Image: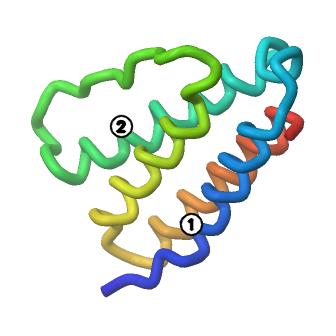
Amino acid sequence: MLDTTSLNRAVDHFADRLRAAPQSRLQRGAAAEALGLARELALRTQRVEDPSGEPREMPEAGMFAAADQITVAAHDLALVLRNEVELAEAVALVEEAQKRAGV
């Protein structure tokens, strides 16, 4: 089994920063960045689980749900990751999104 601790840490850190961010920061793009990340992580999960299936887009649940959305999407992805390369890519996606979000 793949050790996804690094992914869980990165996501938990980003989610905590989002939860602590002021509403103004979320409105200036942090929440949109998090939603984009959640959607990408969910898409990667779907591609592994059902490669020939029609992808479904994670709905927007509002700026205050962004932290929960990235957490759920990352934990789902962690369950289907197949190797260290995929894990490293997922961690990089989270870290880059957090930088762009400015939190």
Front-lying residue, 100 or 24: 24
Front-lying residue, 38 or 26: 26
Figure check: 51 above or below 80: above
- Callout 2 crowding tier (Cα within 10 Å): few <14, some 14–19, many ≥20: some
Q: Indicate the position of residue 65 as horizontal and vertical percent values.
A: 55, 27
Q: Quadrant of the N terminus?
A: bottom left
Residue type at mark 1 is Leu
- Which coloring applies here? rainbow
Residue 94 in the figure: left or right of residue 35? right
Residue 30 in the figure: left or right of residue 57? right
Which residue is depicted at the point 28% across and 63% down? 80
Q: Which residue carries the number 1 mark?
A: 7
Question: CB of mark 2 within 8 Å of CB of mark 1?
Answer: no
Question: Looking at the rendering, which quadrant does residue 21 occupy?
Answer: top right
Which residue is depicted at the point 38% across and 83% down? 2
Q: Quadrant of the C terminus?
A: top right
Which mark is drawn over residue 43? 2
Q: Earlier in the sequence, mark 2 or mark 1?
A: 1
Which residue is depicted at the point 49% across and 36% down? 69
- Secondary structure of the residue carrying numbered label 2: helix
> For the residues marked 2 and 1, what is the alpha-carbon distance in whole angstroms?
16 Å
Q: Nearer the viewer, mark 2 or mark 1?
A: 1
Question: Looking at the rendering, which quadrant does residue 32 occupy?
Answer: top right
Figure check: 81 above or below 92: below
Q: Indicate the position of residue 58 as horizontal and vertical percent values.
A: 37, 24
Q: Indicate the position of residue 89 as horizontal and vertical percent values.
A: 56, 60
Residue type at mark 2 is Leu
Which residue is depicted at the point 41% across and 57% down? 75
- Secondary structure of the residue carrying numbered label 1: helix
Residue 87 in the figure: left or right of residue 55? right
- Callout 1 crowding tier (Cα within 10 Å): few <14, some 14–19, many ≥20: many
